[in-house]
Structure formats: C-alpha cells, structure tokens
Image (cartoon, helix red, strand yellow):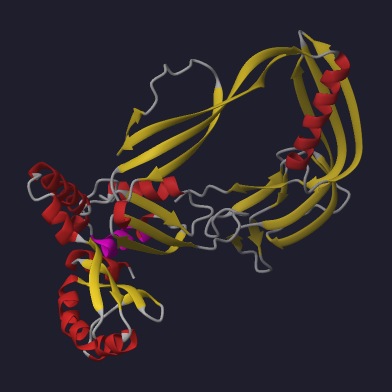
C-alpha cells in the first residue's frame, strides 16, 4: 500500500467534484476506459473522488458527453510541490541532500541484534564478530555473512548454528546453542582417583568405575583416597581408569555469617527525572540545558532509533528514567542483626547445602568488634567425593 501511495505522490493526483443528473453513466464510461478513481463518495446528483492528474484530463470528454459539470477541488503530490517551491532552490536542495545522506548511510550497519541465545551472552558473540569486522559503522558490501558464520561456529563451541542476516542497515544474528553434557567429571581420557572433599563416616557407596577397599560405615578424612583409578585385574595387570562414584557420608559442615552493626544503605528519595540524549554512534549529546545533578541514582534506559521511512541511521534518542536515592548510615541492635544474619543464612543454605540431607543444626551468635557473627554447625548426609587427576610420567 505504501508503494501505491508513493507512486500517486510522485505522479500527482487531484480531488475533484462532479455535479449532474447522469453521474452513474459518467462513472461507467470512466471505468470502461481504464481510468482509476478511488475514495469516492456519491449521492444521486453529486460525486467527489480522487484520480491521477494525467487521467483527470481524460475525464473531460465523458463529462461533456453525459452533461455533468466537473471541477478540481485540490491538487496533491510532487508536481504541486515542484511548482510551489521551484524558486526556493535551497529548500529543494535540502530535501535532495537529506535523501542523499539517508541513501549514503544505508550502505553501513547501524544496528546489530542477537536473538536465540540464552547461556552465551550477546556481548561475547558481538565481541567476536567485532574482531571479524562486523560492528556498528561497518560497510555492508565489505561483509561476508557466510564467512562470519563459519568462523564464529569454529570459535564459539557453545553454538550449534548461526545465521547473519543483513536487512537494510540492521544485522540480525540468529543463533542456536549447543546442548552440552553437564560438567560432572574430568575429561574421560584422564585417569583420576576420587578423594574425600570433607571428613566423615560413609553412608552409601555407588562405584561406577575404579576400585575401592572401603565400605559403608568406614571413616575418612578430608583428602583420603576413596576410589582408586589404578585397577588391577585377575591376571595381575594394572590399568589406569577415570574413577567414577557416588559417595555420601555423615559429615559436619559449618557456615559463618557476618553482619556489621553499622551499615550504609540506599534510601530512595521519591524524586524522579527523565534525561534525553542524542546518540550518534557511540557519542552522546545531552538534550537538556540544566546542569546534570551530582546525586546518586538508579536508571532505566530506553533507546529510540531514528529510522525515517524505515531506513536505519546512526542516530537515536536515548531516554534515561532516573530514580534518585541517598546513602544513610543504619545501626543494628543485637536483635536486628540476628534477624538479618538468619535471613542471610537461609540464602547460603540453599546455595551450599541444596543437595544435602540436614540432620542437625546448631546456631551460636556473638558480637565482635562491631560485627554480629552467626555460626551454624550442621550434621548432614552429603556427597563428599572429589575427582583428583593421576599424573602419569610419559
């Protein structure tokens, strides 16, 4: 539809009015002779519609033949502009220069988008593409999308597929990430033992590869060998393997939480402001006159690209929504510090003991040099095996 409107603008068109008794006959003659009319409104003796300037002249014989009266109400399009501004050379030159600049800028890349990634960051992908020549301001004809795809797949092993699509001045990088197995063990080709990460009493043992003389109920110390990667077969021959096992033991564990009794916290003032900048490539020009306030604030940034007629340009308006805050010193008493320490302890339990079966927990708190110290001692059943590579002389 945009193309149709654009062509009408270039050719020029008119809104005209027809008055008479034989409106229907007039319109039928126009239609049979291939004259295009649009957006018409009709009553019994009147008609108002639009047609191209060149076709309006062809309607006059039909108006004379049917006895209707026809007149132009308004003219539109480039021919009208050209006639109106033919003596304003600067104005016309400015328009031509504007479109010329847009056409020139269309030869460069002004926007790069990465879609489809979850674990691999967009910055990592863009940094590598930048090394290969794809960046904001790159000349489009100098880019080889297929070569960029090939090199990126070879370099970024986390990706299984990539497509670099250039549309106008926007480059869209579509990726699929490789599904990697969980990093549970050392490389399979490396011989290793399994040693104790913590001291404890073995509760269960599931040995998948390797050899062990220990059994359930035995006690081990941190660093002790549990499963050996050096295996001797029935013929007395020795081989080296990658030991694998699931070893759980009763063990003691400790978490310490420190809460300063005097802390500096951020308090929002409730004041907000919006600051706008004109961004040209990587440079920013403030669009506000007042001096930027030297205060602390959080902000949310929105970038609005300048893209007339759908053409990408290196210009954009950046809008910062700022929320101001002050820093205040907060002092905790013993009760408040303990409550904060317990909250932090719950967070650490979820991180450090997520897969452990906690049997007992003992808490003790004390104040030392302006700090509330909370110690949590646990008796739990947890995985204690840790792989340790066997270094062989070659």
Residue at image location 31% in from the left, 80% down from the top: 20
Depth check: give the residue in front, 230 or 333: 333
Left or right: 388, with 115 as reference point: right
Task: Determine the main secondary structure of the stretch shown in magenta.
Answer: helix
Residue 270 in percent (x, y) is at 65, 24
Residue lying at 81% horizontally and 25% vertically, measured from the top left: 341
| In the image, residue 221 above or below residue 16 | above
Q: Is 305 contained in the magenta span? A: no
Residue drawn 60% across the image and 61% down it: 238
Q: Could one spot residue 212 in this view of the protein?
A: no
Quadrant of the image containing the N terminus: bottom left
> Which of the pair 26/160 is nearer the observer?
26
Image quadrant where residue 360 sits: top right
Magenta stretch: give its range.
144-153
| Relative image position of residue 306 (x, y in whole percent) | 34, 46
Q: Quadrant of residue 231?
A: bottom right
Give percent across and percent down for residue 132.
27, 51
Residue 101 in sight here:
yes
**Image vertical order of residue 68 relative to residue 132, above or below:** below
Residue ranking furthest to the bottom: 32
């Amino acid at each position: 539809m945009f193309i149709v409107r654009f062509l009408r603008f270039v050719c020029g068109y008119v809104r005209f009015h027809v008055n008479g008794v034989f409106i229907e006959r007039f319109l039928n003659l126009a239609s049979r002779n291939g004259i295009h009319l649009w957006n018409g409104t009709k009553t019994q003796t009147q008609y108002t519609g639009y047609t191209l300037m060149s076709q309006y002249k062809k309607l006059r014989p039909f108006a004379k033949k049917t006895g209707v009266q026809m007149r132009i109400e308004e003219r539109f399009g480039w021919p009208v502009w050209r006639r109106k501004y033919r003596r304003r050379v600067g104005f016309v030159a400015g328009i031509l220069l504007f479109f010329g600049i847009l056409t020139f800028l269309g030869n460069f890349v002004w926007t790069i988008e990465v879609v489809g990634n979850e674990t691999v960051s967009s910055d990592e992908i863009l940094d590598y593409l930048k090394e290969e020549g794809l960046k904001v301001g790159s000349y489009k004809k100098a880019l080889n999308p297929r070569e960029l795809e090939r090199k990126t797949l070879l370099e970024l092993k986390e990706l299984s597929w990539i497509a670099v699509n250039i549309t106008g001045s926007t480059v869209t990088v579509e990726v699929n990430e490789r599904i990697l197995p969980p990093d549970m063990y050392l490389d399979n080709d490396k011989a290793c033992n399994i040693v104790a990460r913590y001291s404890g009493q073995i509760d269960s043992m599931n040995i998948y590869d390797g050899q062990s003389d220990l059994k359930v109920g035995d006690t081990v110390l941190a660093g002790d060998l549990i499963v050996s990667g050096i295996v001797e077969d029935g013929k007395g021959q020795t081989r080296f393997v990658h030991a694998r096992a699931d070893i759980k033991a009763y063990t003691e564990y400790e978490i310490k939480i420190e809460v300063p009794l005097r802390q500096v916290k951020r308090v929002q003032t409730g004041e907000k402001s919006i600051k706008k900048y004109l961004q040209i490539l990587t440079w920013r020009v403030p669009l506000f006159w007042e001096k930027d306030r030297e205060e602390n604030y959080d902000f949310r940034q929105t970038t609005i690209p300048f893209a007339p007629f759908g053409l990408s340009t290196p210009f954009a308006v950046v809008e910062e929504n700022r929320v101001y805050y002050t820093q205040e010193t907060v002092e905790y008493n013993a009760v408040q510090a303990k409550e904060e320490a317990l909250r932090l302890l719950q967070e650490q339990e979820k991180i450090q003991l997520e897969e452990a079966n906690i049997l007992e927990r003992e808490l003790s708190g004390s104040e030392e040099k302006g700090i509330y110290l909370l110690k949590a001692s646990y008796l739990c059943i947890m995985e204690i095996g840790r792989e340790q590579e066997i270094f062989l002389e070659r």
